[in-house]
Image (spheres, rainbow, N blue to C red):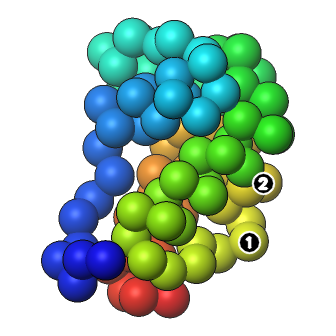
Amino acid sequence: MTTEVTQVTVEELATLMKKAAGVTVDPHDLARRADSTFAEFGLDSLGLLGIVGELENRHGRALPTDAERCKSPRAFLDLVNGALTTGA
């Protein structure tokens, strides 16, 4: 477990989408279409739940329950990075 707070980047999210859900997304496309829904990228709620679990394990803390309900990459990154920064 690390105490250093890092921000989850678009690139890391794209990697997690591949690892946790088997969904391959170009990080540049993900950044360009950050307000699109996860469904448009082929990621379902179970895949998003896997990403949340991976991030919780990596950072050693629970993320807000709303994280698994985010509809877009931008909303997810804003919520997760806010929680990691504040420790909430």
The structure residue drawn at horizontal position 72% and vertical position 35%, both measured from the top left corner, is 47
Q: Nearer the viewer, residue 79 or 84?
A: 84
Instruction: Give the x, y percent position of residue 1.
Output: 31, 77
Name the amino acid type tagged 2.
Arg
Name the amino acid type tagged 1.
Thr
Q: Quadrant of residue 2?
A: bottom left
The circle on residue 33 is none
Q: Nearer the viewer, residue 37 or 60?
A: 60
Instruction: Give the x, y percent position of residue 54.
Output: 53, 53
Q: Which residue is mark 2?
A: 69
Instruction: Give the x, y percent position of residue 4.
Output: 18, 77
Asked if residue 37 can be seen in this view, the reply is no
Q: Are marks 1 and 2 in contact (CB under 8 Å)?
A: yes
Asked if residue 65 can be seen in this view, the reply is yes
Gap between marks 1 and 2, in whole Å? 8 Å
Q: Which residue is mark 1?
A: 65
SS of the residue under disc 2: helix
Q: Nearer the viewer, residue 62 or 64?
A: 62
Picture layout, residue 22 above or below residue 68: above
Picture layout, residue 69 above or below residue 15: below
